[in-house]
Image: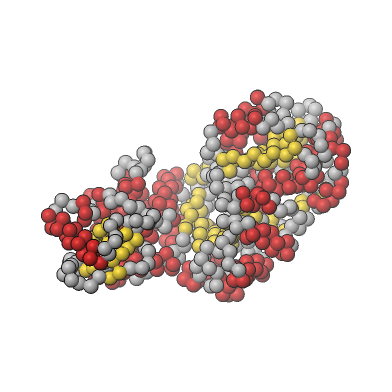
Amino acid sequence: MIISKVNMKQLNVSRNPDTQSSGLRIVLCTLNSKYSHTSLSLRLLRQSIRQVLPEADLVLAEYTINDQPDQLLRKLHELNGDIYAFSCYIWNAVLTTRLVKELGIIRPDARIILGGPEAAWQQEEMLRELASVDYILAGEGETNLPLLLLNMLSGSIDDSTEVCSNLSGLAWRDSDSKIIINPVSSLLTDGDWPFAYEDDELLALKDRLLYYESSRGCPFGCTYCMSSRDRRVRYRDLNTVFQELDKFIAADVKLVKFVDRTFNCDPVRALKIWRYLLDKYEQQPYTTGFHFEIAADLINEEALNLFRRVPTGLFQLEIGVQSCDQEVLSAINRACNLDRLEHNVQELRINSRMHLHLDLIAGLPGENHEQFIAGFNQVIELRPHMLQLGFLKILPGSIIRSQAADYGLAWRHEPPYEVLYSDKMSFEELQKLKRVEHQLDVYYNSSSFSLSISYLMQAAKSVYGLFQLLADIYYREGWEDRAISRQNMWSLPILLTNPKYQEYSQIVFRQKIDEGVLRDCLVLDYIAAGQKDQPSWQLPLELSDLENDKKLTDLIRIRHRQEYPASRRIRLERFKTNPAEMMKMRQEILAKGHTDWTSVIDQSTVTISGWLMVFDMSGNVPHPLWQLNLAEDIQSVPISRFDDKI
């Protein structure tokens, strides 16, 4: 039978009850990119198979790409599977291919099935390359994998020509070893995929990243995206969505990431889900956070008003900008109102407490290096919490892959299929962006350097130029070819004031960087990150060999014993600027992305005695206790006490 549209309940009814206990073991396997991640696809397949084969001996084998290949092969062998089904993605394809080849050697009697996007769009190529693979599935695995397994477990797969020819999206070899590829002819009805998680599983995985989908498909046609091949959107019933979200909340799951391709492509429906989660929180606060990939230009005023009420940590928004050039967006068939996007992101950054993650893609056709730099500066001026600088991937099956020759694109022909050069950007220019990406991740996206990078960014003529200069110094110091130490990472910004890089700094900055102010910023960032040591780049007062510094240290410790008789574990830090004001500025930067540096810049031009702050070192993170102005009488001036942490 050829099924044109599949309903899971119908599959459940039509299963053969005599094949439910075959004794064969089915291993569902995938390799996640990190241990903290979990596989949604494996769990969806497991639940779908159980609807058809409730008594099947089903094993879920979930590993990571960072595991040793020899250990992975041993574990797979020890599972003693009769059927191994692998879910293949761009991040695990190379290692999965290796495992499949070797598994076929040590388990020649086992049947091997591949699925997932990385296999689905290369069925013929992978069947030719991988003799150990028996079947490759395209389309939705919840529809065709249970049917394939049903036939395999019943023994009818031996009559492969008749059975296999009727399975949607199946690639297989007939009796003459000819590769046959069936078209995808079956899709689940709207929202008719199972809930992926079991109750005990939610509790066991609550501290890891869990994935959820309330819709499938995307109405937009971005040529680099796999979703552009099928622009139909199927939605899960909202009441079902609400019930399933309740399960995550009840299990106290840390973070749930919606994998809907564009979550708010239906703004009304998206708003209903956001409102449900927020109303539920306001009635009874909970700790589960939710991550959404959205189109920011589709956010309406009603959504903006709702987002103003969202507490810290409840929602995260990932916004794909990709390019700030309208002609480039048109070339990749990406619809976006850039003015509306910018307005909405500004509103969200200033008037909400949500984490904002923005994306740019380098190497898009039609965009040169200068255009990309202009877009980078435009986006980072919005001060998102994270700016991801990605690189165009020429994915198998994507529309842009069929256009690549016309554009003159070159790319790596193994995963992740990253562009090597485009029609407008050379390999050398893309490599410069790779170096900038690294500095961006360290000094901006990590949020560890919030105060320091804000000070540098406000002084830069071009923020991109700042990160390019950091990348150049990183390279010139010889750190690119070896693992950089933590202390080198923290001291790198100070090299911007080094005379040997003065020529480059004068080009990048509109005003001279004050080394003392920058050091103050770095010290406060370093302490806020929980670091308790005093590296040499800090020029710590207590480790100074100068006689005046030793006397100052003694006087401050005497004063501290007078103010805090029971306190002993302390640290003294000397600052050029008022550290209390700098701490407030750091909080403002974290909350809103911006702060006014005018007073600090004006103050830094005046020679003053400086400030001193005393930190309590008894806790996990240093805590400011008190400070004073060193221009005053240390023994008698009233001190400023602190109750707030950095």
Residue 642, image quadrant: bottom left
Q: Where is residue 278 in the image (x, y as percent from the top left)?
A: 60, 69
Q: For this view, does 411 lie left or right of residue 450?
A: right
Q: Which of 83 and 443 is in front in this view?
A: 83
Is residue 368 visible in the rendered image? The answer is yes
Q: How many labels does the image show?
A: 0
Is residue 457 visible in the rendered image? The answer is no
Q: Nearer the viewer, residue 599 or 284?
A: 284
* Residue depicted at x 57% and y 56%: 255
Q: Is residue 320 above or below residue 478?
A: below
Q: For this view, does 176 lie left or right of residue 117?
A: right
Most distant residue in the front direction: 566
Most distant residue in the left direction: 547
Q: Where is residue 148 in the image (x, y as percent from the top left)?
A: 78, 39
Q: Position of residue 8 (x, y in %)?
A: 80, 51
Q: Which of 389 and 620 is in front in this view?
A: 620
* Residue depicted at x 60% and y 29%: 74
Give the quadrant of the N terminus: top right
* Residue depicted at x 53% and y 52%: 365
Give the quadrant of the C terminus: bottom left
* Residue depicted at x 69% and y 50%: 198
Color style of the picture: secondary structure
Q: For this view, does 337 lie left or right of residue 578?
A: right
Q: Where is residue 48 in the image (x, y as percent from the top left)?
A: 75, 47
Q: For this view, does 279 lie left or right of residue 496?
A: right
